[in-house]
Amino acid sequence: MSANTSIKQLPLSMWLRQGATFDSYVSAANQQLLDNIRNVAALGEEHFIFIWGAEGVGKTHLLQAACHAATNAGNSSVYLPMQEAAQFAPEMLEDLEQMTLVTIDNIDAVAGDQAWETALFNLYNRVRDNGECRLIVSAHQPLASLGLRLPDLLSRLSWGLVYQVQAMTDEEKLQALKQGADSRGFELPDEVANYLLRHYQRQTAALFDLLERLDQRSLAEQRRLTIPFVKQVIETDFRSSKE
Amino acid sequence: MSLWQQCLEQLENQLNAQQFNTWIRPLQAVEEDESLRLLAPNRFVLDWVNERFIDNIRNIVTQIGTGDQHQVVLEIGSRERKTQEPAVRVAKVANNTAKQEDKRRANFRRREDQSQIHYVSNIRDEFTFSSFVEGKSNQIAKAASVQIGENPGVAYNPLFIYGGVGLGKTHLMHAVGNLMLEKKQESRVIYVHSERFVADMVKALQHNAIDDFKRYYRSVDALLIDDIQFFAGKERSQEELFHTFNTLIEGQRQIIISCDRYPKEIDGLEERLKSRFGWGLTVAIEPPELETRVAILMSKAQQMNVELPHEVAFFMAKRIRSNVRELEGALRRVIANSRFMARPITLDFAKDALRDLLAAQDKLVTIENIQKTVAEYFKIRVADLLSKKRSRSVARPRQLAMALAKELTNHSLPEIGDVFGGRDHTTVLHGCKKIRELRDSDVRVNEDYQNLLRILTT
């Protein structure tokens, strides 16, 4: 595992990094959804939420923020990214209903896979029987377009609250980027933030990844965040991604 | 701050967010004088953490340990975990009112003294006959279920209920169970989902407790097994089910089975089981028709103490036709919106609240999709549907597809004719009329139509 080696290479700021939280989630259009996810994470009335939306609208952030909130409240939680399912096995779902909150990201990644679908169906039933566990599931597509082969799983996912996650407006992205920079302990000037929005991928997740790298590189190279510096980072990224 | 909390902070910074949330967050810590016990929810997580993260965790604990040498122990478990029987999982009977729970606990305890077996009924209180909305689509199944609840083991044994997902099979089973318990408190009525039966049997085999497992299921007064199709291809479990079935029927103990299809149509199930399933009464539950869907919404809203105007229920029932779960999900959504915005539920409000849900549905139902689905259903080619062929095997599916296109999309008759190989709008009109007539006179055509409607709108 590279965890140990990579730690040495990371600049100091990594130690100050904040994980995804509800407070760092900015979006006017998703207030109600956010409110409901907060409630589920705080063991409110609803037990199941299914959220869907395009790549990069912040689903992963919401799920991890829910886990974070659960931990803070002294409850157990787990985050399962199904896009990594090839590395895992359906057995990892066993007994997870003993957790207080289970979040499943990108369920579409295992749609059509019989073993995973059955395991998820069983998990759903156990969570429901248990009565105290909460389940949040995310996908890129609405339920009917997921390509699930098990109608039993499909109908169960449609049983709880279903929300589409709306994409952020440019204004919100700008605000989120500046807030993200602030929580990492550096300032993102308006013109640089605007430059990022205009010249980089527009998906929030990609923008935040870039923000993370900008933070590391500016610390490592002792540079201020200027447009030429940002350009340079983006170009190096681009070159290394092609190699 | 506790040792584990400090440790978590460091780990959160060292690992990427996904690793942290997936593998570290689910660990529950028990801090003792000389050790830090970390509980993983299952073997898989335990192995993963052991392989990849445990050294890192130990290093951090040593670094922040205040002079004390903490031993880090990783094991499977949960702080909140209930004890588990090797053969039969003892789960909490969820959502019971305190009184009923006490009643059942006493009941189980008494049994336990007698036979050393913990019976867990798993019957859910909220699924009763009074909360079951009756309609044309389910009245026979309900009538049979009530009779069985009144006279278990005598009236019809087994009762085999079949129908699509989310139509109320599970609700009926629990309702029978509740009625049996109401009539005779000490009845050992056990509801179990087929997957749970299979999984528990595998566990029993692993733990050398298969005799306990057998004794448990063969000594109940009523066994309600849900979604029997999940036994398909599992020979060892079928064998066990077969013997359990025989023992219970011989002892005049009630069996209720649910399935998503007719017994004879379950692939991968032994013939001797299929034939036994037909010994008693086999009843179907159909998708609820419009009035029943409205009634279901009204009843559900009442249970949730929400005032739902009739026109809103009508609108929702018209738009959501696949199954009851989806109806309930939509109702939850409307209620959540109304609470969040502190506004009463009106027709416009509901339309707005369900916009994303309905848009997702509309997007899916295109004429092309209908053609593809119908062709697949009848095992013909889409090209045949569009061709000039007029043989019955092609013409009937074509008419069905046209009727569905008229029903499910907003396209006009000429537009539909156009995409069906450039046909005239009167041909489409004729097709729709023909299907309407046939649905009344030919059960099979009606069934095909309903099935396709469900596939397309689920």
Image (tube, coloured by chain):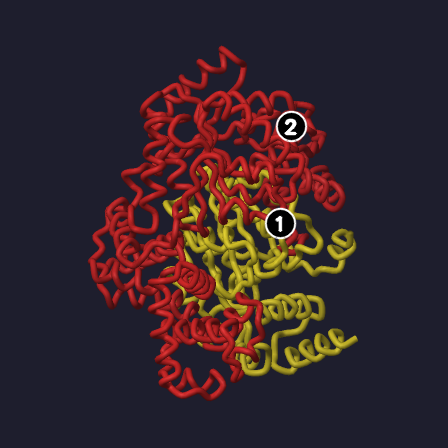
Residue A26, can we see it? no
Q: Quadrant of residue B76?
A: top right
Q: Name the mark on residue B22.
A: 1
- Residue that lies at the very extreme toward the top in this rendered image: B114
Give the chain letter for red.
Answer: B
Label located before the other in sequence (2 or 1): 1
Coordinates of residue B113 in the picture (x, y in percent): 49, 11
Q: Which residue is mark 2?
A: B204
The amino acid sitting under disc 1 is Thr
Q: Quadrant of residue B44?
A: top right
Residue that appears at 49% across and 47% down: B262
Disc 2 element: helix
| Distance from Cα at disc 2 to Cα at disc 1 | 29 Å
Give chain A's shade. Answer: yellow
Q: Nearer the viewer, residue B162 or A36?
A: B162
The N terminus of chain B lies in which quarter of the figure?
top right
Q: On screen, A11 above or below B232?
A: below
Callout 1: chain: B
Instruction: Tell me: B10 left or right of B124.
Output: right
Coordinates of residue B59 in the picture (x, y in percent): 74, 41
Instruction: Tell me: B318 left or right of B70.
Output: left
Residue that appears at 67% across and 58% down: A12
Callout 2: chain: B
